[in-house]
Image (cartoon, rainbow, N blue to C red):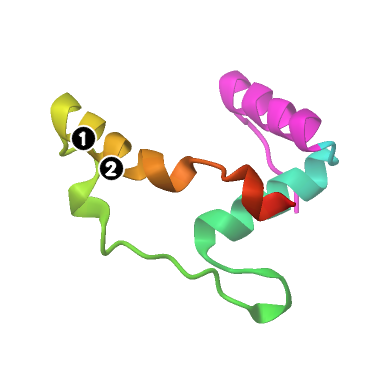
Amino acid sequence: MTLRNIPADLQRRIEEEASESRSSLNKTVLRLLEKATGVAPEGRAFRRFHDLDRFAGTWTKEEAAEFDEALAEQRRIDPELWK
């Protein structure tokens, strides 16, 4: 398969992605195509979940701060547990 007329900005982004993942252009394009189409290697399908999509970006800054505050205790590391 040969791809032609790839827009310069798309080519640049694919090359950046390949560089960041230290993969060849071919492997990078295959991985991106697999992800975009939902087809994984060896016939496994990627599972996509959209049940929480409607909540994305709906919190106010105050609600987000309140949520972060509520989770702060869970993020606290108890040194006694690591002895």
Residue denoted by label 2: 70
Q: Position of residue 37 (x, y in %)?
A: 52, 61
What residue is at 62 percent from the left and 31 percent from the top?
6
Residue denoted by label 1: 66
Q: Position of residue 19 (x, y in %)?
A: 79, 29
Mark yes or no: residue 60 visible: no
Would you say residue 4 sits in the magenta stretch? yes
Decide: marks 1, 2 in contact (CB < 8 A)?
yes
**Quadrant assignment, res 65:** top left
**Quadrant assignment, res 52:** bottom left
Mark 1 and mark 2: Cα distance apart in space: 6 Å
Instruction: Give the side of residue 25 with respect to residue 71, left or right.
Output: right
Residue 2 position (above or below residue 62): below
Instruction: Give the side of residue 52 with respect to residue 27, left or right.
Output: left
Residue reaching furthest bottom? 43
Q: Look at label 1 and name its amino acid.
A: Glu
**Quadrant assignment, res 12:** top right
What residue is at 29 percent from the left and 35 percent from the top?
69
Quadrant into which the N terminus falls:
bottom right
What residue is at 66 percent from the left and 27 percent from the top?
11
Mark yes or no: residue 25 visible: yes
Instruction: Give the side of residue 33 with respect to residue 60, left or right.
Output: right
Residue extent of the magenta highlight: 1-21
Q: Look at label 2 and name its amino acid.
A: Ala
Mark 1 burial class by Cα count in 10 Å: few <14, some 14-19, many 20+: few
| SS assignment for the magenta stretch, majority | helix
Total count of labels: 2
